[in-house]
Image (cartoon, rainbow, N blue to C red):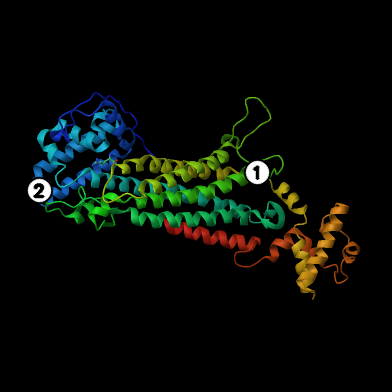
């Protein structure tokens, strides 16, 4: 996300040129700083300029501005856009926010015509419009990082469709699974995150502009013109609602919190897997750091940080919910507090997705260690129970029989597949030498060969479907 953070904050108590008329004294110097938002809302400068250009264009079309005035305004705004992009714009805290900074600067540049831009509009509908434009762009950028990460996951799943690892419940070895299947579980979570963000985008992409301060305006505005120019799918139907609600931002933060929750779960697994105790994966050095004291250390900083950053996103969601709660209609200054949590949520989610999208293709998988871990820990015990059931034993009895065999294995330090037929027959004489097929890891995963199962063939088919879904996004 681009950030024009070149604020030159000077705060002499000055009579505000935008609303000084009614006031008999200048704003207190501290209050001026306290109430200003320019330090953070300058992030929306591009959106503010685009909104103003659309507004001026519409005003000219309905005859409120002349064509010449419109052109002067638009040229002035484009020049300001360049100044901001070049880092030459002097932001002033005395002018409170991005909106008044740009408007005041426009008037300085083009003279009296600049004062006509704000006709039929208020900062209340202006700011609500800017945030929506900003968030719409942010969602699009996030969705494309999400797609990049998902593409990497699908490729990884295809490469590792046959790789066997222990599957866990309660972090205890449960049943063998394929690593590709495990990776596609993450990918499913991300498909839902994508859906949620895309759905949220529909409600973000509605235009408040034209609501003016709260009640609409007396000028013959045509909101459909501005909406079209700005690429909105529709308008906010009610002016009071349009300037006041921030539910679209809350909804985005909720979707972001869930996406971060998913990333934090992946992170937890990567941290575990990269440890000497698991030793399932190697993270490329460029995604890790060392220790200043322990020379042997290679720390999985990126997953750890992503896991940690989930906290701040959850916090932002609560901030915004609390901000909105109990606000009476229509706009209240409270809403100025919406921006920092929202912007930080956008940046955090984007950056975490970017780090993951970069890291995933470089993940090194230690197949032998995964396999060895699956071989230990009696991961095919359920397969033996199912084998007995298929030979006629009721499942509860077979569960009991296999439990005894596992107890024997623990005492003898032998996995089920390492026992002789004679040893196995102690527990049930219906066991015969075809049992070894089901006790192998391959036999176990291949047997789960149905839609959604862990068999390598199913993983390849699921990855193919995922690929198709990703291709449809473009
Ligand atoms: N800086 C304000 C915000 O972020 C802009 C709107 C202010 N409107 C007002 N009437 N004070 O919400």
Q: Residues within 10 Å of mark 2 (few under 14, many from 20)?
A: some
Q: Is residue 251 left or right of residue 265?
A: left
Q: Which mark is residue 272?
A: 1
x, y percent for residue 407: 84, 57
> As rendered, which of 157 and 28 lies closer to the eye?
28
Q: Which residue is outermost to the bottom?
A: 392
Where does the C terminus fall, quadrant-wise? Answer: bottom left
Q: Which residue is mark 2?
A: 64
x, y percent for residue 85: 30, 33
Label pair 1/2, CB-CB below 8 angstroms = no
Residue 264 visible, this orientation: yes
Where does the N terminus fall, quadrant-wise? Answer: top left
Which quadrant of the render holds ligand 1? top left
* Cα–Cα gap, marks 1 and 2: 65 Å
x, y percent for residue 311: 51, 42
Q: Is residue 190 left or right of residue 85?
A: right
Residue 126 vs 458, above or below: the answer is: above
Q: Residues within 10 Å of mark 1 (few under 14, many from 20)?
A: some
Q: Is residue 311 left or right of residue 130?
A: right
Q: In the image, what residue occupies the spot 59% across and 32% down?
A: 289
């Amino acid at each position: 996300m681009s950030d024009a953070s070149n604020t030159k904050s000077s705060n002499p108590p000055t009579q505000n040129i935008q609303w000084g008329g009614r006031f008999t004294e200048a704003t207190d110097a501290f209050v001026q700083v306290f109430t200003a938002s320019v330090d953070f809302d300058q992030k929306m400068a591009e959106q503010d300029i685009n909104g103003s250009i659309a507004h001026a264009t519409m005003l000219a079309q309905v005859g409120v501005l002349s064509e010449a005035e419109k052109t002067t305004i638009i040229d002035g705004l484009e020049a300001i856009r360049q100044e901001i992009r070049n880092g030459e714009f002097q932001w002033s805290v005395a002018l409170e926010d991005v909106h008044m900074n740009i408007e005041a600067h426009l008037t300085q540049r083009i003279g009296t015509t600049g004062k006509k831009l704000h006709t039929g509009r208020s900062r209340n509908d202006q700011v609500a419009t800017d945030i929506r434009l900003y968030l719409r762009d942010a969602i699009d950028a996030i969705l494309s990082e999400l797609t990049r990460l998902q593409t990497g996951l699908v490729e990884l799943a295809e490469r590792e469709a046959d790789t066997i690892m222990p599957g866990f419940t309660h972090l205890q070895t449960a049943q063998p699974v394929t690593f590709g299947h495990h990776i596609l579980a993450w990918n499913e979570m991300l498909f839902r995150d994508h859906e949620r963000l895309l759905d949220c985008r529909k409600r973000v992409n509605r235009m408040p502009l034209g609501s003016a301060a709260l009640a609409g305006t007396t000028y013959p505005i045509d909101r459909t013109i501005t909406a079209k120019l700005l690429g909105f799918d529709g308008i906010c139907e009610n002016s009071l609602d349009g300037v006041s609600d921030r539910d679209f931002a809350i909804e985005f933060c909720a979707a972001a919190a869930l996406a971060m929750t998913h990333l934090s779960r992946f992170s937890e697994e990567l941290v575990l897997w990269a440890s000497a105790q698991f030793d399932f994966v190697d993270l490329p050095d460029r995604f890790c750091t060392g220790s200043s004291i322990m020379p042997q250390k290679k720390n999985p900083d990126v997953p750890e940080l992503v896991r940690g950053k989930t906290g701040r996103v959850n916090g932002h969601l609560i901030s915004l919910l609390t901000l909105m709660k109990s606000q009476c209609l229509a706009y209240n200054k409270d809403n100025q507090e919406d921006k920092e949590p929202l912007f930080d949520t956008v940046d955090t989610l984007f950056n975490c997705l970017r780090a993951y999208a970069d890291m995933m293709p470089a993940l090194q998988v230690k197949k032998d260690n995964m396999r060895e871990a699956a071989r230990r820990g009696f991961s095919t015990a359920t397969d033996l129970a199912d084998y007995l059931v298929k030979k006629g034993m009721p499942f509860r009895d077979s569960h009991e029989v296999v439990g005894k065999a596992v107890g024997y294995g623990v005492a003898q330090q032998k996995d089920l597949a390492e026992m002789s037929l004679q040893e196995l027959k102690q527990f049930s004489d219906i066991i015969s030498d075809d049992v070894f097929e089901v006790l192998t890891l391959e036999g176990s995963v291949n047997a789960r060969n149905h839609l959604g199962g862990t068999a390598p063939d199913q993983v390849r088919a699921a990855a193919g479907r995922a690929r198709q879904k990703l291709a449809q996004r473009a």
